[in-house]
Amino acid sequence: KKNNCVAVNSATSALELSYELAGIADGDEVIAPVLTFNGANLPIVRRRAKIVFADINPETFNLDSADVEKRITNKTKAIIFVHFGGCNDGLSEIISLGQKYNIPVIEDAAQAIGSSNWGHADFTIVSFQAIKMLTTGDGGMLICKNEIDAKHAKRLRWFGMDREERHLTGDSD
């Protein structure tokens, strides 16, 4: 399998890329958990999309899939699943909803490294910030389910240029 990982300077940048790849734009709706870090929602607001907050399961603090399903409309462009404190309970159900309604799932796995179930959504965000499970001092990564999205993300993060192709032709940056 090809490497669909895209290194970036922060998990917030990875979220921004995932929202771009999901096509989130003015007037769209994005379902997000009511309990999350503001940094996950600010890029949605900048895109002029509407955040539709969904309830959480009080035992896991993760999205309640039954409540998410009630909130899906024809304007729903993505569902954000946050591994609260690294807990992944409910992720499989949210991914199933995304598949059922053909809606991309964006998995904020900033604290999920080391857990038993992560990296299965259309887009998975990882943080290497100083207080995370695996740190590099800072930085992040976007993991794309498909290779086309990963290639597009790599171009977007580097001013629209394909760095790998430039290196093959001997052009340095």
Image (spheres, rainbow, N blue to C red):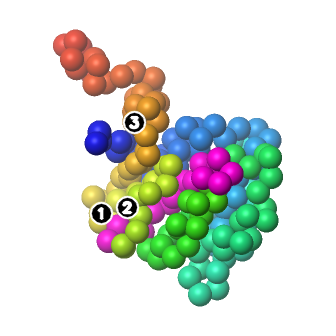
Residue 74 location in percent, x, y? 80, 46
Please tell me how crowded label 1 is: few (under 14), some (14-19), or many (20+) other residues with Cα within 10 Å.
few
Q: Residues within 10 Å of mark 2 (few under 14, many from 20)?
A: some
> Which element type, helix, strand or loop, lies under badge 2?
loop
Q: Residues within 10 Å of mark 3 (few under 14, many from 20)?
A: some
Q: Which residue is mark 3?
A: 147
Q: Report the mark closest to the observer, 3 or 1.
A: 3
User: What's drawn in magenta, residue-wise?
Assistant: 99-114
Q: Quadrant of residue 148?
A: top left
Residue at image position (80%, 41%) is: 27
Query: At label 3, which amino acid type do we have?
Result: Glu
Q: CA distance from mark 2 to mark 3?
A: 26 Å
Q: Is residue 127 magenta?
A: no
Where residue 121 appears, as percent x and y from the top left, is 49, 55
- Judged from the image, the secondary structure of the residue bearing numbered disc 3 is helix
Query: What mark, if any, has residue 129 been given in the picture?
Result: 2
Q: How far apart, in angstroms, are the residues tagged by discs 3 and 1?
A: 26 Å
In screen coordinates, is 122 left or right of 119?
A: right
Using the image, tell me which numbered label, if any, was put on residue 135: 1
Instruction: Judge whether residue 172 can be spotted in this image.
Output: no
Amino acid type indicated by mark 1: Thr
| The N terminus: image quadrant | top left
Do tag 2 and tag 3 residues touch (Cβ < 8 Å)? no
